[in-house]
Amino acid sequence: MSIVSIRPGAAPKPRKIVEATQKAIDALPLNSGEWRIGGFPGFWVRARESKKFRVLKKVKGEDVSFTLKATTLKEAKVEYHDIWNDLKPRPDPGTVLTLGPAIQAFLARKRPKGPVGEKTKHMAHENVRRFLADWVDRPLKDIPADRLGIRRLQEQITAISESCSNQTMKLLAAVYKWHQAVDPALILAWPRGAYVIHDIAPRKWAFKTDEDLRAWWTDIQRDEKGKPLLIDGKQVQIGVTLLGPLKKMYWLVILFTGARNSSVRLARRAEFNREIKVLHFLENKGNPAYTVPLADVLVELLDRYLASGSIPPSPWLFPSPVKNGEPLGHVKEADDLGIVSTHHLRHHFKTELTTLGASKEQTDLLTGHAPDRRDINTGYLSITARVIESLRPLVNEVAEHYLKVIPEIRDVTF
């Protein structure tokens, strides 16, 4: 792209207009002069010995010309869009609400069920950092009018991740609509038709067989053909059983409760009630805190873990081994060691409950899922101690099955 300043008032005349299609551009005769491309302000094509796309815009009283490198209309639209937006005057952040502060206010809002969850905030900030860095200074009121820009943004993100694309588009829509409810400057409707929300199939992460579950606990490392990998003539053992006391107990809690990674990492010792055998999860991905009955074997394991002296005194059930006074940081899966993500265990726990005939309400209570507000029955359910206790037989049955597959869990030492 080359940039040439030209005299004020030097825009091409007369203004001949060509339809914004490649077929119409191809049909223009050579040496027919300048043509404005319909529907795009300041977008031109010059037909001389060859055809060149150009962008013309008045900046501070002077016309500025940009000759594009693109040879097709599709490519030229991409360059045109970038240039046109870059030339827009930047608003005074003190007088005009821009996207960046609008997102911050949206994430800081109070909802009926409490503040926005930390994980939701983290994901939003990451998507802003990765995909919206060039948008944060744009006036919020102008964004719905830029349908082409929204579509192009979504296409760029989709090429990286359909999930991130959905998250970013939903964030933009939610931020705009939330502010629109009280801001009279936001008069445009949100352009939902300018992009698509991808239909992403749910992941099927439950272990397919008992052998897969056992391999998660202990296995031998294998090569690409599935044969045992030998180092110095010896098989290499892998699995959760090789981990230290803290990480091993962490994985066992997730196995026997199906709780989320963040719920277990941020669990406090005081929330483990040994007398009534329950664990209270305060962190629940933005949903209300919840309490689960613990399988008898899990209570025994937690007793042994806490009395072992292998972890430092801390209010956290799983204290950080590197940051004094902090909870355990994010725990990553280690495929090379046979340790899958925590969500695999959550999926497997729910699958085991379904196998035992647990109802949707029972499964939701045990896994901390928010109630379905479309189901009127959920409004009549009060979570009492008796309701929680009624779920105990289910968690004990799941635990008994796990112990049949991995009997050595019962005698784990810390």
Image: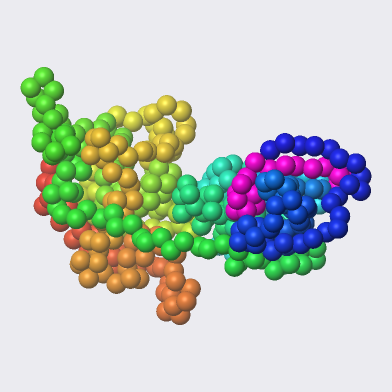
Q: Is residue 93 visible?
A: no
Q: Quadrant of residue 309?
A: top left
Is 26 on the left or on the right of 350, as rendered? right
Q: Residue at x 41, y 32 (%)?
A: 320
Quarter in which the N terminus is drawn: top right
Instruction: Look at the picture and state if 145 lies above or below 225.
Output: below
Q: Which residue is at 39% across, 68% downward?
A: 384
In this rendering, would 369 be left or right of 107? left
Is residue 169 in view? yes
- Look at 28% across and 44% down and name the residue there: 340
Where 284 sits versus 220, above or below? Answer: below
Q: Pinpoint residue 380: horizontal percent, then vertical percent.
A: 44, 78
Residue closest to the far bottom? 376
Q: Is residue 157 left or right of residue 186?
A: left
Q: Position of residue 219 (x, y in %)?
A: 14, 38
Q: Which residues are magenta?
A: 58-77
